[in-house]
Image (cartoon, coloured by chain):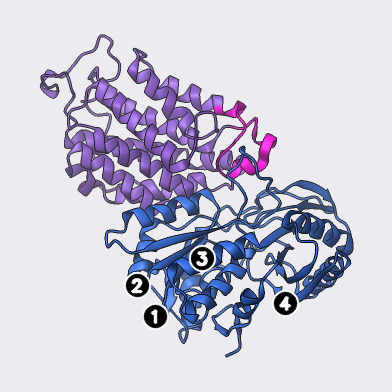
Chain colours: A blue, B purple
Amino acid sequence: MKKLINAPETVLAESLDGFAAAHADLVVLGEGRKFVRRVKSKPGKVGLISGGGSGHEPLHAGFVGYGMLDAACPGQVFTSPTPDQMMAAAEAVDTGAGLLFIVKNYEGDVMNFDMAREMDAAGRRIETVLIDDDVAVEMSTFSNGRRGVAGTLVVEKIVGAAAERGEDLAACRALGERVNKATRSMGVALTSCTVPAAGKPTFVLGEDEIEIGVGIHGEPGRRRAKLAGADALARDMVAAIVDDLGQARGEVLLFVNGFGGTPLMELYVMYHAARTRLEERGLTVIRSLVGSYVTALDMAGCSLTVSALDRDMVALWDAPVHTPGLRWGM
Amino acid sequence: MGEGGTALPRRLVPHHRTGLLSQGPSVTLVQNKNAEGGVQIDETMRRRLIEAVAETIALHAEELTAIDAAQGDGDHGLNMNRGFGAVTAKLDDIAAKPLPEAVQEVGRTLVMTVGGASGAIFGTAFMAAGKVLPEAPTRADAAAAMDAAVAAVRARGKAEFGHKTMLDVLGPVATALHGDATDLPAVAHAAAEATAGMQAVRGRASFLGERSVGGMDAGARSAALIVAAICGVVEETP
């Protein structure tokens, strides 16, 4: 294992301390490093709290700030945070308008966020939006359902803007669910990732092998395949996404997300390939995002996310945002 | 872990069987039993129970992680060890509480330190069991506590028997407690082994689909280790 760390046990604490110091104008690290919150909460605004295992940076703490999240709870690497973290975050950012938990659909995350709601003694109004945008996992009774992956960013951005605009808790939750339903993602891994505490790759891929449908923790996807060109890969991924989305025409957002170990140059190659395939299928790309935002440590590869946004969602996507990981319009 | 200097040497005194779990012929410390036949779990025994469970998890942490690496994401041993390390750090406080509160506090500590599905599920199991345990449990009380743990885990994890989870150990152990089985650790270990033949429906292993068949579930292995450690202490108390 070759990593810029001091010790596996101190990675998370040192990374959070560095993050908070680097972005002290935007965020504050809560006591005991239980959460990262905005420097200043806005009274009367619905508070957005997300969180999950660490190792996906900038998700989620990197999206704390104006126009997105109010707080994020970082768990251990690839391990959901604990209920006390969400309870402390809720206490810190609740201004009386209620709180919305944005939770990726993994059992650990769902259970721990649920327990935080149940254990909250203050009787706060808390609602939850579950994100499950990964088309790689087939819906069936033999699974926990789909995973939440890069589409989480789209939900956090759009609902964040709505909360900033003054929408109430019920409206924020309903919007989050609509954006989630309009969003599909699929990933492909070229290499494994290495969890610092494990010290060795989570899985092994041959020199010419890829995992199609990989999750953001290096979980297996649909199948293992031989490495193909970007055009062929994009064709397969776009087909899986668009077929599932059931949207034959219309305008979409295309988000090409790097997993942490792939250069931006390649992400733009994939963007070009994916955009071409989408247009061939009759879809018009009206908004784009390219970069490594929802990562899996040092995994090489990327995911494609397609969101069929309505006019209001597009306006909310365009609204100003100022966070460590995403900034425009201000 | 466990090197606080306060723990009594575990094997210095001869061990006697309490008969709480075995029901078989045993040398029983009469003063430990109440009128209903329950065994008073005193502070020394509470301490030894916690130490024994933490010890077995620490001892098997690497094995648990290896099992998990083949099925899930390879951090189960690490996370469980962090949780029971936190429990051990509070050993004096927890052992000083009466049994029901002590068991619930173990659960709360796991929930707040392990993270992931494991923390929520194992923590929930201890919290639920602690709520129904009396201070001096009989075998019937132990069975009721296991039932409560099973019910709480099913609700929290939305899991059923056969989904290849720790429930597939807790269930058979509960059944055995209601019956007259004497070797509960054997029941627990056999149940954990049996998860190898199951296809995962819950947890990250479920993403493997049919590829999940063949390996034991790490949570089931943990549950069996914990059951065995508890039985070891309860069956052999000084």
Residue that carries the numbered disc 3 in the rendered image: A11
Segment tinted magenta in the rendering:
B195-215
The span from disc 4 to disc 3 (Cα, nearest Å) is 35 Å
Q: Are marks 1 and 4 on the same chain?
A: yes
Judging by the rendered image, the residue that carries numbered circle 2 is A92
Mark 4 is on which residue type? Arg
Q: Quadrant of residue A105?
A: bottom right
Say which chain tag 2 marks.
A
Secondary structure of the residue carrying tag 3 is helix
The Cα atoms of the two marked residues, 2 and 1, are separated by 9 Å
Q: Residues within 10 Å of mark 3 (few under 14, many from 20)?
A: some
Pick the front one: B48 or B72: B72
Q: Nearer the viewer, residue A283 or A136?
A: A283
Instruction: Name which quarter of the figure residue A242 lies in.
Output: bottom right
Q: Which residue is mark 4?
A: A287
Residue kind at label 1, given as amino acid type: Ser
First in sequence, mark 4 or 3: give its number. Answer: 3
Q: Position of residue A75 (x, y in %)?
A: 47, 60
